[in-house]
Image: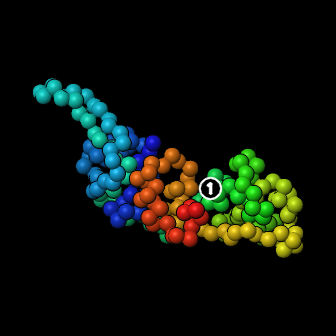
Amino acid sequence: MEVLQVDVSGRPQSWISAKEAAVIYASDGIAWTLGEIFRVLRGGTQRRTGLQSRIEVHPIVAVRGCVPSRAWRQVPALSNTKLFSRDRLVCAYCGGRFQVDSLTREHIVPTSRGGLDSWMNCITACRPCNGRKGNRLPEEARMSLMYLPYVPSLHEDMILQGRRILTNQMEFLLASVPRTSRLHS
């Protein structure tokens, strides 16, 4: 399990390992934490006291002194994994739910016709529907979209990255995801 690192305002910055979080704890770089302790890292034994050092890691840590993330202003990187997650493994043309290996990235406006490889031009399609549409626009192929594409927010992007997310982390991220997002369904 990874730790969700946020800036002091609560904007997600990245997923980090528990060991990376421990370094921030040890350098007094944590402003606040959320969630129940999910990992305890043990260190060496002190000669004077005989006590073993330990750092209790929380699932969400706000890092002190970090510049607030500007990532929320940027468009998240597009990948098939995140695209298929955004679209809930559902083909935009037939509405069927498929396994990942049966899905493709479909460009609404084909790239050969000037379409961009972007969140707003890409949807999830099953292989048969993608083949049927081919190098045409949906209306030319007499195929209609069952849902519209959208650009995920920073909070949605953190969810779409495909990591194993703890309940506390998911609740924190979903609290800032628009109610209209498919991630709520």
Using the image, determine if residue 108 lies above or below residue 89.
Answer: below
What x and y, as percent, mark residue 82? 61, 56
The residue lying at 70 percent from left, 69 percent from top is 147
- For the view shown, which residue lies furthest in the front direction? 185
Position in image of residue 164 (x %, y %):
51, 46
Q: Toward which corner of the image does residue 44 lie, by quadrant?
A: top left
Q: Position of residue 2 (x, y in %)?
A: 44, 45
Q: Secondary structure at mark 1?
A: helix
Residue 135 visible? The answer is yes
The vertical placement of 99 against 74, above or below, is above
- The colour scheme used here is rainbow
- In this rendering, position of residue 91 left or right of residue 119: right
The quadrant of the picture occupied by the C terminus is bottom right
Where residue 103 sits in the image (x, y, percent)?
A: 74, 52
Q: Amino acid at mark 1?
A: Ser
- Is residue 36 left or right of 161 when viewed as pictured? left
Q: Nearer the viewer, residue 162 or 179?
A: 179
Q: Residue furthest bottom?
A: 139
User: In the image, 40: left or right of 119?
Assistant: left
Q: Along the line of sight, which residue is nearer the eye, 62 or 86? A: 86
